[in-house]
Image: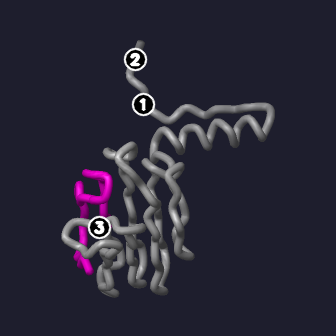
Amino acid sequence: MGALTSIPTVTVGNPTKKSDYDAAVSLVTYGATIDGSSGLTLTASDIGKTVIVNSSSDRTIYLPSVDSSHIGARFVIWKLGSGKVTIDAADSDSIMDSTAGGTIYNSSSTETWACLILRLETATQWGIQGGVGTWTTT
């Protein structure tokens, strides 16, 4: 079998099936995403998803209440735009060296894109697994 030299065209007779196919390809390619452009309160069922915050206004993303059964849980948060993005820990949880129930934020209007990957390290401690941009804890 030869190498694939161009993207094949897929023709499906039922438009609903094509949109289902397109959604499946997007999920496999990009993972599950959530629009956080208006701010968002995450739940445990959102664990593993990527939050995209595309706004020129300040927005807050609230992390879910978690416990030891969620250790290893991960969120990816993208800041797109000039607005401040604040990530707020639930309950008495902390993010890196933040206070209990603290936050981490990127307020740089010149960093029109930044990313933060958070992973739950203990029952109450979110760690930074990776990221780009200037993030500050409180």
Q: Dot 1 lies on which element?
A: loop
Give the crowd class for mark 1: few <14, some 14-19, many >=20 residues within 10 Å.
few
Residue 110 higher or lower than 26, as above or below: below
| Relative horizontal placement of residue 50, taking residue 35 as reference (left or right) | left
Can you tell which of label 3 and label 2 is closer to the viewer? Answer: 3
Q: Quadrant of residue 3?
A: top left
Residue 20 higher or lower than 80, as above or below: above
Amino acid found under the numbered disc labelled 1? Thr
Residue 130: x and y, percent? 23, 57
Residue receiving disc 2: 2
Residue 123 higher or lower than 98, as above or below: above
Q: Which mark is residue 94?
A: 3
Measure how far apart labels 3 and 1 are at the Cα level.
49 Å
Can you tell which of label 3 and label 1 is closer to the viewer? Answer: 3
Give the crowd class for mark 2: few <14, some 14-19, many >=20 residues within 10 Å.
few
Q: Which mark is residue 5?
A: 1
Does the stretch in magenta take in 11? no
Measure how far apart labels 1 and 2 are at the Cα level.
9 Å
Sequence-wise first label, 3 or 2: 2
| Relative horizontal placement of residue 23, taking residue 41 as reference (left or right) | right
The residue located at (30%, 74%) in the rendering is 104
The residue located at (32%, 84%) in the rendering is 107
Please tell me which residue lies in front, 120 or 76.
Answer: 120
CB within 8 Å, label 1 to label 2: yes
* Magenta residue span: 115-138
Amino acid found under the numbered disc labelled 2? Gly
